[in-house]
Image (tube, rainbow, N blue to C red):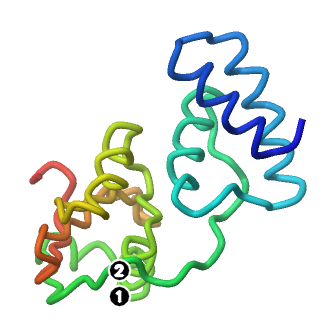
Amino acid sequence: MDPVTTYFEFLKAFDSHDHDTARELAEALASSLERDGCWPERCCRTVVRACLEQVLGRKLNVPLPQLPPLFTAGRVLVADSVRTVVGDAELQSALQRHVRGDWGDADHRRVQLNETALAGRGVLQSVYDSQQAYRFKVVTEPDRSFTCVLPAEEF
């Protein structure tokens, strides 16, 4: 089965809670991704990654390809509590991932909300862990006029 067909079959099994089939297809798709690095079309990459990692119970060892920005972050405001722990390079990396649709460690529901919000001008939210295991969120307002970087527990 080709990766795109495997992907759609995986999502059907995942959504219908057919755990055995979802796990089998997840293993096949993860192997293909980790071996070849070929992702289905962009609109589904973060969803695919989140679903696969949930079913497999592990992180995929495959980076999302560098994509063009999907939106502008507007003015960026960083909470002092985040700035004292997270370095500038890590903040820039998180912001670049965020505007490209790599939602970090956001849960499956948040990933789906973000994908919908891209078209409908809703709130976009990502979750990242710093090298010091400090969890923070990147939140862009619906009008894309500003983005806040906050400790995860504040939002």
Amino acid identity at mark 1: Asp
Q: Are marks 1 and 2 in contact (CB under 8 Å)?
A: yes
Identify which residue is drawn at 71% across, 58% down: 39
Q: Position of residue 137 (x, y in %)?
A: 25, 60
Q: Is residue 83 left or right of residue 127?
A: left
Q: Secondary structure at mark 2?
A: helix
Residue 144's image quarter? bottom left
Residue 58's image quarter? top right
Identify which residue is drawn at 17% across, 60% down: 123
Residue 54's image quarter? top right
Relative to residue 28, is residue 73 depicted above or below?
A: below
Amino acid identity at mark 2: Leu
Q: CA distance from mark 1 to mark 2?
A: 5 Å
Relative to residue 122, is residue 11 depicted above or below?
A: above
Residue at the disc numbered 2: 91
Circle 2: is it few (<14), some (14-19), or many (20+) Cα within 10 Å?
A: some
Residue at the disc numbered 1: 88
Q: Position of residue 62 (x, y in %)?
A: 72, 58
Q: Position of residue 125 (x, y in %)?
A: 26, 59
Relative to residue 68, is residue 134 depicted above or below?
A: above
- The number of numbered badges drawn on the structure is 2
Identify which residue is drawn at 66% across, 35% down: 8
In this view, the residue in front, 77 or 140, is 140
